[in-house]
Image (cartoon, rainbow, N blue to C red):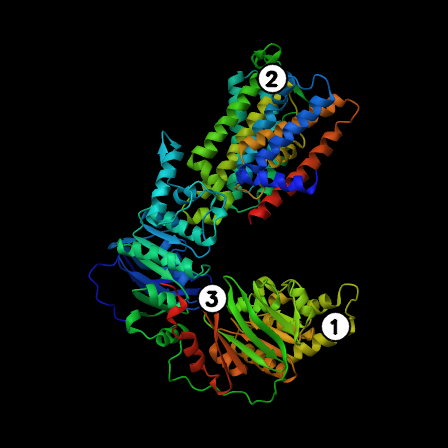
Amino acid sequence: MTETPTRSADPVVDMRGITVEFPGVLALAGVDLRLYPGQVHALMGENGAGKSTLIKALTGVHPPTSGSIHLNGGPVEFTAPAQAQAAGISTVYQEVNLCPNLSVAENILLGREPRRLGAIDPRAMRVRSAQLLERIGLSVDPGSVLGSHPIAVQQLVAIARALAVDARVLVLDEPTSSLDTDEVGELFRIVRVLRDEGVAILFVSHFLDQVYEIADRMTVLRNGALVGEYLPQETERLELVSAMLGRELGTLEEVERRAEERTPGTAPLLTAEGLGRTGAIAPFDLEIRASEVVGLAGLLGSGRTETARLLFGADRADSGTISVDGRQVRPRGPRSMIAHGVALCSEDRKAEGVVADLSVRDNLVLALQAARGWMRPVPRRTADALVEEYIERLDIRPADPGAIMGHLSGGNQQKVLLARWLITRPRLLILDEPTRGIDVGAKAQIQKVVTELAADGMAVLFISAELEEVVRVCDRVVVLRDRRKVTELDGDTVTVDEVMAAIAEHEPEAVAP
Amino acid sequence: MNVLDVTRARERIERLPQRFLPVIATFVVFVLTFGTGSVLYDGFASPQILTNLFVDNAFLIVLAVGMTFVILTGGIDLSVGAVAALSTMIAAATLQAGWPPLLSVLAVLVAGTALGLLMGLVIHFFDVQPFIVTLAGMFLARGLCLLISVESISITDPAFRTVATGTITLAEGVTLTYSVLIALAVVLAAVYVLHLTRFGRTVYAVGGSATSARLMGLPTGRVRVGVYAVSGFCSALGGLLFSLYMLSGYGLHGVGMELDVIAAVVIGGTLLTGGVGYVAGSVLGVLVLGTVQTLISFEGSLSSWWTRIVIGVLLLAFIMFQRLIVRRTE
């Protein structure tokens, strides 16, 4: 399956053995990629697989440490985005990289404005940009301010900009992640037009349905290495998913489930009905009972974190209701959900959790103090006792309450964050990727604590990209795909194979033609 | 105004192009303050009072133009007052030493531009906050002033005095100085550069989103350095106009002037975060400040510190106004 499919034309872009090293990190190791004119090539992989790094190597943002790039047969070396653009490689980034304060016409032509006698010719600019907008069939006023248009239109304007250079290679870095179905259809229509004009297109996406709809070939990366190149018509979805996640089907050994030492309560602790938010997650139902660990599984971008944020009140829902203990609540931000006993341990511990300059002790007591209010300081003795208890229970190392948080390893920081929420004795604990980027020992420790907590009566919503972990820890697993809840598995169906099959399952109506 | 009037006014405002709103608001404030003066005091609504606004604030207009470039990229330049003072000092000292006036003017402009360029290079290549770098530039320029002389040096050069006192008669009893012409020329040049050259459009792009501008392949580094050089040049030129106005060089000229300039630019509708604003707005901002000052001198019994209080209130009002617009468009 890794042999190059036969092709009539020579590749426009031929990247060989691309290696990118950042201080202390090997981001890409010897990856090959070939792009052919008139073809859409999908680049796939999970978080940290190296997709963005590969694109940045191609577009001159981060020049490769070693390896070669050939453009139309000739070797090239780009050290700045401007050089790659001049050579005909245009990129549309995931978060629209245009200037919202300028007009549509300016954003399309910025840096190559038509000039007359050394001055920019506004008339020619309007005409030229209108032509480019017409080519992609987008009817917006070139003179309007870019920021006044929705993201989807901005994304299409970015494509118009890419065309202004007569791009022979167009890189689309997750262009669909913030678009709705109709907008994706519009984007694909334009992509097909460009493909038929002979442009080579590199399409990065997490959405399997979209990739199968538009791609002629697919390259899968995992952990900075090339897994292989696949043809969509010859590749089963399941095969592709297992390539992305790095699991061979069939050889997966049934992971030993922990003994069922807990009996979930009968009445649901938290119920979500038709809860949803446009662009984040389609309306879904969810019930979580006391003493139950519910998993959220799905590929990156499938809406896992968004679901957690909705339940925690960090984002406002467009539709649906949340009830706690059968009574409907109206979340007005995290504080109101915290008051109902819900806690969220976020996936981005650097930005949202750790106070690196404070001691472990201070970090641990933060949330408890916040819950009590500043009028009632936590007594020193209570704090010391709690800190000691949780350092021991979670095996935080060094076991020194005075250690500076920033000096701890990632795994131990994560344990401190977990302990911080546990001290407040939440009734429902939402853990978003609690074990990402930490070592095996710390991982096992956290998994053990989660199951113990559930046995003590706490409800846990467990989010993880690692299927084995989800399967091992959870009683029930909710599977998300393309920002929708697709199924819920429980009992004997909670196996890695079942979850993977649910993630890969094909539903033709998911993307409009 | 009752609620209905407010809604109606808002509807009317919404029909205007959103991006000109702040400038239009500044214009309205200018008309209102000037109108207040005309109603309250005899002789306020005369053409000469209007032209005097330009005569008395020509240097401030030039400084505000340079500051507009910097703030449009999202930066700030605290050194402009001190560089202007240094310019008066260099001009006065070199003229006293017997330099030909043209050479002395050239020396001032080169020194100011070089200082601005230097600050821009430090800001860009060492990635230091503009606030700190230009604060250092401010101290440096003030120090250099006092190094030249701690005393005020008066300018006696005949050519300089001719330009300073020369007037152009627009109509019966309405006169302008050459400084005003220079200031207006600078304004026109700035409008041309900002709106009709790639450098100018990149200034807006950098202020709108520096990362985007870089990924679009625009020469962001050149622009970030360039705006400080422009501001340095404008500070030097503004200083020259100030020395024409005062006919002296003094190390303590224009203390706190940088803050007046920033206030004028902000009142003129330029966002401190960059990317949004017009030179015309900054000019209007200067005129508003000038009108407030004239009003208070007409009143006579009020201390000149009232100018500061009014400017403070206006500044606050405008920043809140801008926040409202930004929040609405979000």
Provide residue A239's location: percent of width, then percent of height.
35, 76
**Residue farthest to the front?**
B4
**Does the CB distance between marks 3 and 2 fall below 8 Å?**
no
Q: Please give the chain letter of the residue carrying mark 1.
A: A
Is A363 rendered above or below residue A112? below
Q: What kind of residue is marked 3?
A: Gly
Comparing labels 1 and 2, the label whose residue is closer to the camera: 1
**Dot 3, how many residues are within 10 Å of its Cα: few (below 14), some (14-19), or many (20+)?**
some
Q: What element carries label 1?
A: helix
Provide residue B45's location: percent of width, then percent of height.
67, 19
Identify the residue position indicated by label 2 in the image: B96
Observer-nearest of A233 and B135:
A233
Q: In which quarter of the image is residue A263?
A: bottom right
Comparing labels 3 and 2, the label whose residue is closer to the camera: 3
The structure residue drawn at horizontal position 53% and vertical position 36%, both measured from the top left corner, is B69
**Residue farthest to the left?**
A8
The structure residue drawn at horizontal position 44% and vertical position 51%, both measured from the top left corner, is A154
Identify the residue position indicated by label 3 in the image: A301
The structure residue drawn at horizontal position 43% and vertical position 86%, both measured from the top left corner, is A253
Q: Please give the chain letter of the residue carrying mark 3.
A: A
Q: Is mark 3 on a helix, strand or loop?
A: loop
In the shown orientation, is residue A330 left or right of residue A188?
Answer: right
